[in-house]
Image: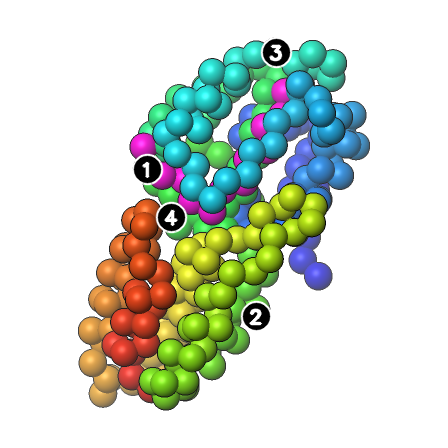
Amino acid sequence: MGPEIKDYLDKNNLHHAYLIEGGRDTIIPQLLDFLKNLGINTFNSPDFQYISVDSFKIEDARNLKSVSFEKGFFSGKKIFLISANNFLLEAQNALLKIFEEPIENTHFFLIVPDINFLLKTFTSRFYVITNRGDSAIEKDAEDFLSMRLQDRIDFLKDFLKEREESDENIVEDSIRSKAGKFLNTLEIVLHNKFFIKEANQDIDFDFFHHLFKVREFLHQPGSPTKTLLESLALAIPVL
């Protein structure tokens, strides 16, 4: 078992902004326990705000900016816990200033499934914690590469099914974020296979460029996730 989130946090010297990469259903309970140990009331308190959305939009950024300067009432600290599968580019740009210039006794915890979808200028404002745990997706990626085309199509149909929401009001990763993690893992597996382990020079590597394009389109709101991944199933040879 790897380190828990609390192992990265110093309760006596909290950073003003944390960016945590990983699954929200694992991370959020750990964060809530940590905050309770700090004396932060996480239930119906004006000192604590929990925001959980699929895409964090410009309107969300403006609302966050407007309330972030309010002082804490009871604990002396104000905590913002934000979980989003995707931060739109305009929202990231709108938030740069508040994450660059710390607000006294105000702390932000942002949870995303993949920091690679964020601007470098945005992530540079944070103390970054990675807590992926993607061993299951890595196996899926390896199995996917050995499948025939129809088996790949059937796999994607099942892989991209919606999961039921948690009874604890913790929204599961969206299909788009799950697809993004799968793409990233698929790229790593392919890179290891061709450039580290086998160094096979007899294969046309154009499918790498197609993978990059699929990732680029996947990042755009409204893009057809299933169609994009099916195009990749066609592009990558059976290995």
Q: CA distance from mark 2 to mark 1?
A: 30 Å
Q: Secondary structure at mark 2?
A: helix
Q: Are marks 1 and 4 in contact (CB under 8 Å)?
A: no
Which amino acid lies under the numbered mark 2 shown in the image of this protein? Ala
Pointer 3 with pointer 4, Cβ within 8 A? no
Mark carried by residue 119:
none
Q: Which residue is mark 4?
A: 117
Disc 1 versus disc 4: distance between alpha carbons? 9 Å
| 164 over 8 or under it: above or below | below
Nearest the viewer among 170 and 198 is 170
Foreground: 153 or 5?
153
Looking at the image, tell me whether mark 4 or mark 2 is earlier in sequence order: 4
Crowdedness of circle 2 by 10 Å Cα count: few (<14), some, many (20+)? few
* Rendered location of residue 169, percent (x, y): 65, 44
Gap in Å between the C-alphas at discs 3 and 4? 32 Å
Name which of mark 2 and mark 1 comes first in the sequence: 1
Q: Position of residue 181 (x, y in %)?
A: 45, 60
Asked whether, in this view, residue 69 is left or right of residue 166, the answer is left
Q: Which mark is residue 136?
A: 2
**Part of the protein shown in magenta:** 77-90
Say if the magenta span includes residue 86: yes
Tell me the number on the disc at residue 89. 1
Residue where numbered disc 3 is placed:
71
Q: Residues within 10 Å of mark 1 (few under 14, many from 20)?
A: some
Is residue 39 toward the left or the right of residue 49 in the image? right
Q: Amino acid at mark 1?
A: Leu
Q: Is residue 76 magenta?
A: no
Label 3: element kind: loop
Residue 213 lies in what quarter of the image? bottom left
Q: Position of residue 153 (x, y in %)?
A: 38, 78
Our reading of the magenta stretch's main secondary structure is strand
